[in-house]
Amino acid sequence: MRTNFAEIGQWQEEGLTSVAAAGGSLLDVADAMTEPYQVSHHIGYLLHTAVDHLHALTTLLEQSGAQHTFAPYSLIRAAIEASSTALWVLEPAVPEEVALRSLKLEYADLNDLKRANGTVDPTAGHDDVRLQVFNDCLSRHGWKAPAVKARPPGTLTIIQGTSAHFDVFGSALMWQMCSAATHGKRWARHYLTIFEAEDDGKSKVLSGRLTSDESAIALALNIACALVRKARSVREVHSKNPLREGASFIRPVAGLQIIEPGLYVPARQRPLFESQ
């Protein structure tokens, strides 16, 4: 876990500096399609959520001097959920699809707000101001309301899909077990906790000590970090202009390069430029 703790600390520090979507990048195009609900901001918020929970876990384990039974799994669960959601948004690698997924989640967020307000006022509807901003966004960018307002997949479906697509083994099952620990469901206790029982041979009730399993916490944490790491990596790729940065800018490709209207130079004759 020490390696994961060090990585989480680095993420926490780097989080103070925002990641800008370079002009011409996938996220830059998606941002233009969703303003003022920029996708890059949505991804940043989800990753901040994930890292914040993981950093809280490092504080809990390193500074409290105690290993809590269930709290670590609650924090890990939140990180798995938030980072998987970020990956689900980024998964299509096509600006239109990325933008559509982000907007679907934004509308689901508006519905969640409506339900929350309904717990205080049963007659409450959508927040009129926020709903108007959202509808204006759809109109301004040409989005069709039925497509955007369709319900997004459930959390487990999202995690299962991103786990398979990005090859992060075990994240769906681990999220389910961490959720069980969070909500006091007992089925996962055999996987996440250790019970040291004492049987007096007389009572029908076993007494003993219930503790968390350090190896289970380490495994769950490793999966959560793998998801955050993958989401950060995919975001970084989609924040760069593929025609100006990275390996594709310095690697020769077959075909023609336009120099100016009416002129071209075969690829094999082109000079190689260092990435800037």
Image (tube, grey):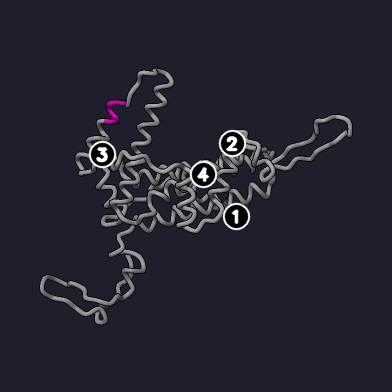
Residue 266 in the image, given as x and y percentages of width and height: 22, 80
Pair 1/3: label in front: 3
User: Is disc 1 surrounded by few (<14), some (14 to 19) or many (20+) residues within 10 Å?
Assistant: few
State the residue position of label 1: 3
Camera-nearest residue between 104 and 32: 104
State the residue position of label 3: 145
Residue span colored magenta: 127-131
Tell me, yes or no, whether the two marked residues, 4 and 3, touch with CB atoms within 8 Å. Answer: no
Q: Dividing the image into 4 quarters, which one contains the C terminus?
A: bottom left
State the residue position of label 2: 182
Left or right, residue 198 beside residue 88: right
| N-term mark: 4 or 3 | 4
Camera-nearest residue between 219 and 270: 219
Pair 4/3: label in front: 3
Q: Quadrant of residue 200?
A: top right
| N-term mark: 2 or 4 | 4
Task: Label 4: state its secondary structure.
Answer: helix
Residue 239 in the image, given as x and y percentages of width and height: 34, 55
Q: Give the CA separation, mark 1 to mark 3.
A: 46 Å
